Image (spheres, rainbow, N blue to C red):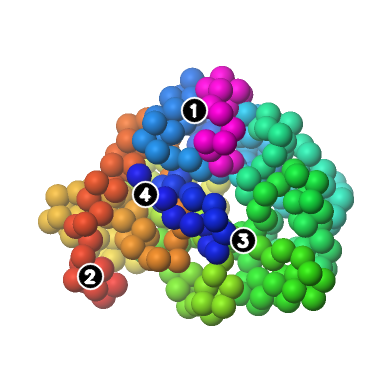
Amino acid sequence: MEYRNLGNSGLKISELSFGSWVTFVNQLGQKQALECMAFAYEQGVNFFDNAEAYASGDSEILMGKVLNKLNWTRDTYIVSSKVFWGGELPTQRGLSKKHIHDACNAALKRLQVDYIDLFFCHRPDPDTPISETVYAMNDLIHQGKILYWGTSEWSAEEIKESFKCAKKFNLRGPTMEQPQYNLLFRDRFEKEYKDIFKKYKIGTTIWSPLASGLLTGKYNDGIPTKSRFKVKGYEWLADSMDKIDFNKIKKVNLLAKKLGIKSSQLAILWCLKNKNVSSVILGASKLSQLKENLDSIKSYDLITDEILKEINSY
């Protein structure tokens, strides 16, 4: 496992990480989650991703139980949470100072940790001034409850505004952004964020490298019954199928076969080849799936500039 700096910070984060979105609680119980986290850690993964919204907080409770049972020393791993969707009441949502404060304290209890390494604003909040959010995140840093704060799925303009605010009031801007990035969804990362990467050197922990399974080759004949597209509460994922270029997916599958690797491994390696990617978050509904995805780094050198050029021409 290789480690990359998280943006312009000194934090070394594993290039592959493990996340709980969709799978924890919905597809993985405590025994399976423990097996996956333990294996990932043994392979050098040091970042484990979560959020208050995942399984309505139960995902963090499950991860907290696993962390407690594994009893790793706290200086050997990185854990995250995200704030935005905490409940149905007005004070339980968004990025107000109150909700950010409450969400952080709740996540600390659920995860059973003394501090959160990475704390993300899960989405932008049009109802809260960005300055209030920046102040709230800096307050948590000063209190020792979080180490770094970041954004997730913010526009380039919103990220710029957060840095302007931080500079004006001598505060810390975001260290990282967590966007979707894969072979099928590239524009925001590669085009919209281009100047952000150049000017602010933010890190990224990208989600959905396999486009929710579309880049594994298993959706050529429809959606399998046990896929995340069928998980209750995530039906919206299936709605995006109409916009997918399946010809591109078939070409990726053929290239992977030619290279002697899995389609999923090719998709993960393609993400890692982008120098603006700090860590690729992997999700898995079973241990064998996680093992296969983590094995992708063994084939890193197969993805030459010529192969990248071919993929980008699809």
**Lower sequence index among marks 1 and 4:** 4
Query: For residue 63, which quarter of the picture?
Result: top right
Per the rendered image, the range of residues in magenta is 65-79
Query: Residue placed at 36% from the left, 58% from the top?
Result: 272
- The reply, left or right, for residue 84 in relation to residue 278 is right
Of marks 1 and 2, which one's residue comes earlier in the chain?
A: 1
Q: Which residue is mark 3?
A: 175
Q: Position of residue 49 (x, y in %)?
A: 55, 43
Q: Nearer the viewer, residue 74 or 225?
A: 74
Mark nearer the N terminus (2 vs 3): 3
Q: Secondary structure at mark 2?
A: helix
The amino acid type of the residue labelled 1 equals Ala
Relative horizontal placement of residue 292, taking residue 141 as reference (left or right): left
Residue position marked by numbered label 4 in the rendering: 2
Q: Reading the chain from its start, which is encountered first: label 2 or label 4?
A: 4
* Residue 130 in view, yes or no: no
